[in-house]
Image (cartoon, rainbow, N blue to C red):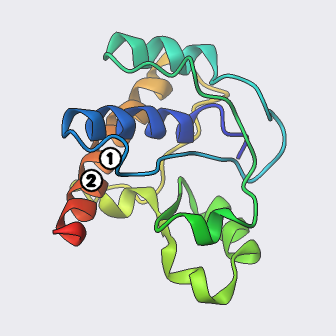
Amino acid sequence: MGNICRSPTAEGVFRHLVEQQGLAGKILIDSAGTHDYHIGDPPDARAQVAAARRGYDLSGLRARQVVSDDFSTFDYILAMDETNLGLLRQQCPDDCRDRLKLFLEFADHGALREVPDPYYGGAQGFEQVLDLAEQGARGLLREIIKNIQ
């Protein structure tokens, strides 16, 4: 929603995986919120601390809101939950709707469809977001590599 917890965490994890695979510069990666609550703000400090413990640096990321050009710029527009997916569907041009998906559609586990928002909870919520971001990011990268080969 505000682009300071879940989506920048997923962006940071995905960037790290892409760099490890030597694909940095070949895959355009960004995150954005559906709301304008935190435009220009860094990720939540709790998200940054949890991510840093696992070797992910979120410090250079800044919140932004989805803009209309995003729908034609990116091949994948991924939402963390059904609410945000619905908001994206309202903005998305008809010819780009196939790009909209839930982030966890790419995760192997299949137990959850949505990444829970950790904002009003404790540290464990940020750890869970990281667990899910790692699973979703690995699956997304596999999908992208499969499609570019």
The picture places residue 99, in percent across and down from the top left corner, at: 50, 74
Q: Nearer the viewer, mark 1 or mark 2?
A: 2
Towards the viewer: 120 or 37:
37
The picture places residue 24, in percent across and down from the top left corner, at: 33, 40
Write the residue at 32% across / 46% down.
137
Using the image, tell me which numbered label, if any, was put on residue 137.
1
Q: Residue furthest front?
A: 25
Mark 2 closeness class: few <14, some 14–19, many ≥20 residues within 10 Å? some
Q: Which residue is mark 2?
A: 141
Mark 1 closeness class: few <14, some 14–19, many ≥20 residues within 10 Å? many
Write the residue at 62% across / 24% down.
43
Question: Vertically, is 97 above or below 80?
Answer: below
Answer left or right for 85 relative to 108: right
Question: Vertically, is 119 above or below 23?
Answer: above
| CA distance separating discs 1 and 2 | 6 Å
Marks 1,2: beta carbons within 8 A? yes
